[in-house]
Amino acid sequence: MQCSLSALLTSILAYVLFASAPINAQNYVKIGDGCEGVAGIPSITALGDPVLGETFSVELGNVDSMGIAAGLSGLSNSQWSGLALPADLGMALGMYGLDPMGMQMDPCILYTDVRRVANLTITGGTAVWNLNMPPLSLEWIGRKFYQQAFVIDSNVGGLPAVLSDAYEGTMIAPPPNLDFEAPTGIAADGNRALVCDRLRSLVFAVDLSTGDRSIFSGGLVGSGPPFDDPYGIVIDGSRALVANRPTPGIGGNPAVIAVDLVTGNR
């Protein structure tokens, strides 16, 4: 196990030294403590929410201003290349600079697998770490990811390389765009109006008291065949019937699509 850990840490060190540099509290939670370096235990602070299709940024703090730092991110907190997580890397990290008195190193726990390594620029004891979130899709909404930083201190005594606190993030969808572009068909359904938007390929629900809009069906709301060019709608009992035609110049599905009034499923 020690040899395996040493090899893993050697690969991380090689990347850090030689590779080129390329909020909501419930969406980003601490899952483990880091280990202490010359500037204290490196901390991570979210600067926003991990929104799909956007750049998620965190600030790494309490790091040696003369040191080297890398951001480690992954999608698992249970294993990495056969290594069970969490894993104590204190001894492996110590192989790069053993305590001169031969004392046992303090534990230093790795909590994430390593799928991406980002070189971080330290300025005044802090560094900003930017991570590009995957594009918006149903498969990524709610997916967990993990982050922890690897810091090489400039001192020669004690543990020369340490790990920061570890965090678990939850990927979230961006707030929906509720602007109309080409509203056409409209039907009343109790205290709301259902409005087809041809260019958005959506059906909106509009509160008749407040004017507030939400997406009733289409896009990521409701399951079933997508709308192409929805242009007419009527209410039929517990469902809405939406006239859908192919998008000009693109094509699609000419059909009348039944939509559940509760779920938006098509």
Image: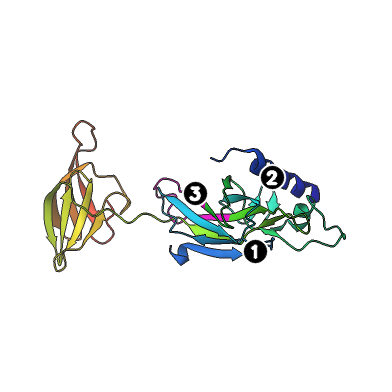
Give the secondary structure at mark 3. strand
Above or below for 238 versus 73? below
Q: Which residue in the rendered view is the most extreme toward the right?
A: 101
Amino acid found under the numbered disc labelled 1:
Ile
Q: Which residue is mark 2?
A: 13
Give the secondary structure at mark 2. helix
Q: Is residue 15 magenta?
A: no
Label 1 CA crowd tier, 10 Å (few <14, some 14–19, many 20+)? some
> Is residue 75 toward the left or the right of residue 260 in the image?
right
| Residue under the point 71% across and 60% down | 108
**Residue 94 in which image quadrant:** bottom right
Query: Between 50 and 223, which is closer to the camera in this rendering?
Result: 50
Give the secondary structure at mark 1. loop
Tell me where residue 150 appears, x and y as whole percent.
64, 53
> Is residue 160 toward the left or the right of residue 66 in the image?
right
Tell me where residue 81 appears, x and y as whole percent.
67, 46
Amino acid found under the numbered disc labelled 2:
Leu
- The region drawn magenta spans 129-147
